[in-house]
Image: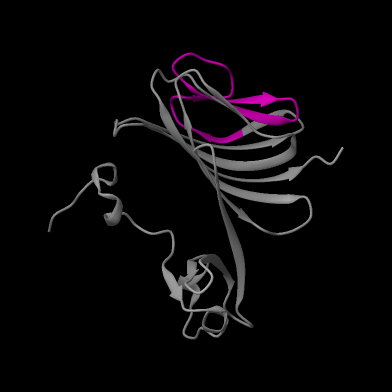
Amino acid sequence: MTSINHSAAQAGSRHAIDSLVYANRTAREGASGLTAADLYRVAYETATGTYWLLTDYTGPIVWKQILVCRAADTLKLDIQEGGIFRQHVAAIELADSDTYDFGDFSAGFGSFMLIQENGGPNSEMAKIFWNNGTIDDEYLSANSSLSDTPGKFCLLSSGSGIQLKNNMGYDALVIMNISYVVNLV
């Protein structure tokens, strides 16, 4: 068996975001045989070109639409829940010494992974919680920091939100999964 690193894979050889495919809404909503192993799998609906997240299979099947939009090298999956709670999965390019500011989020939590671009061997990870400008860590890898530190992937307070800063000495891709409350004031 031949194996290949994702960074060296051709575009047609990469994994798709979806693992379930349905022709249309009727087929997706009428799916049968779904189990606990299918929870939170992504389905692609070919008739509309939309993506859906399975959130319940036990009673009536519940799908949440995932809106996909591109803006300035950012892929954002916004799982619509309504109200002021939001959840995003995003990937951003962050050059060495650059920062990325989030909006004014009063509280939230998230996981972040910084990966060296161009197939480099380095990566850093962090899980944090924040509330009105105070950041607490659940997990920080060796080269992650809650202060502006040279040689580190920095997660910083920014008013009542957060800021990411790449101080690693190389360009990187940051993959994040965050849930937060939007300030309405």
* Magenta residue span: 137-163
Residue 168 percent across, percent down from the top left: 42, 20
Residue 171 percent across, percent down from the top left: 40, 25
Q: Residue at x 58, y 60 (%)?
A: 66
Residue 163 percent across, percent down from the top left: 62, 27
Q: How is the image coloured?
A: one colour
Answer whether residue 102 is magenta in the image: no
Residue 159 percent across, percent down from the top left: 74, 25
> Is residue 125 left or right of 104 when viewed as pictured?
left
Question: How many labels, in total?
Answer: 0
The outermost residue toward the left is: 1
Q: Residue at x 20, y 49 (%)?
A: 4
Locate the C terminus by quadrant. top right
Instruction: Decide: is 41 above or below 25.
Output: above
Instruction: Decide: is 52 above or below 27.
Output: above
Closest to the observer, 40 or 103: 103
